[in-house]
Image: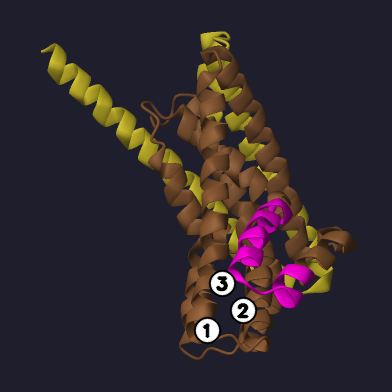
Amino acid sequence: MGTVQIAQANEAVILLSVRAVMGSVIVLLLLIVVTNALRKNPHTKRIAFFFVVLLILITSTLLWTTAYMHIHNVNDDTYVTTGAAL
Amino acid sequence: MLFSFNPTTIAICVALLMGSTGKGHTRAERHVIALSYLITLFIIIAIAGFLLVSLLVALPATVQLNVSLLLSIVGIVWGIVSIKDYYWYGSHRDISSRLARTLHTYTVKKNDPTSATILGFITAYATVPSIGIPLLLVSALVALSHPYKITFMACFAGMILLPLIIIFIAYLRGLTLSSVIKWKEDSKGTFRLVLGLSGIFLSWLILLSLNGTIAL
């Protein structure tokens, strides 16, 4: 019974890992598409760069916060809330 | 593999090949010169990666995790600066005139296997701004994997050299070096974008690993 539970838990972790990596790749692909489309026009260049940096910073901050809380065992509720937002 | 597309290594490799053509070396001599350069560069990158991983693994677990957390910030900042170069290619990317003179000496003036080996060392130093941070990020990722796979660093060094090997083979099969230079100049911004996004992706992988989402 224990072995089955461990196998199921491992499967869930693998599924979550795949989703997380796929999510990151999708965000980055989105950045490339938007960047290429807006970079050609000098007027939208600054907006494109701002959008790209903003998206990177938001995602990075959320990931960094959850990583920090996980390492330092910060309040579980906060961790779950941030994780859900992520 | 995306990190291998950096203008610095490609430019130095092309300069070396042009130098060897200008000196009228035979095909075999050109092989030896190019291989001395590639092998030296491969060994330096692999050893640097191995040392970084060993250093990170030797740290206490908590310190290692905090260092990885710090490295991810460095990676993200570096990635954003690289992406900035895609929009406005900065002049700060130019290497110092002293380094440029040294590179010129070892690519054009002196063109033999020993000079190519020395050039490998100089290139490793010259490319620190381009591949130093990716090397740190990959090392952190390898150190976080349990058990860590050191062969991964050799793969990383091999992949960094892949475009150079392809350019060398294509050159032997008749590719003109001027077309490589044109391609490099036209794609400089895209190289930076790819480098920046790859750096950010690696930083995110580190963070995902640290917050327990992915198991390396």
What chain letter is assigned to the residue under label 1?
Answer: B
A63 versus B194 height, above or below: above
Q: Which residue is mark 2?
A: B17
Chain B: its colour in the image is brown
Q: Residue at x 63, y 66 (%)?
A: B116
* Chain represented in yellow: A
Q: Which is nearer the eye, A63 or B34?
A: B34
On the image, the x and y values in percent for residue B124 come to 66, 53
Q: Residue at x 14, y 17 (%)?
A: A3
What residue range appears in magenta?
Answer: B105-127
Measure the C-alpha gap from mark 3 to mark 1. Answer: 14 Å
Q: Secondary structure at mark 1?
A: helix
Q: Which residue is mark 1?
A: B171
Q: Which residue is mark 3?
A: B33
Proximity of marks 1 and 2: CB atoms separated by less than 8 Å:
yes
Q: Secondary structure at mark 2?
A: helix
Q: Secondary structure at mark 3?
A: helix
Kindly identify the amino acid type of the residue bearing the numbered disc 2: Leu
On the image, the x and y values in percent for residue B48 come to 58, 41
Disc 2 crowd rating (10 Å Cα; few below 14, some 14-19, many 20+) is: many
Q: Is residue B145 magenta?
A: no
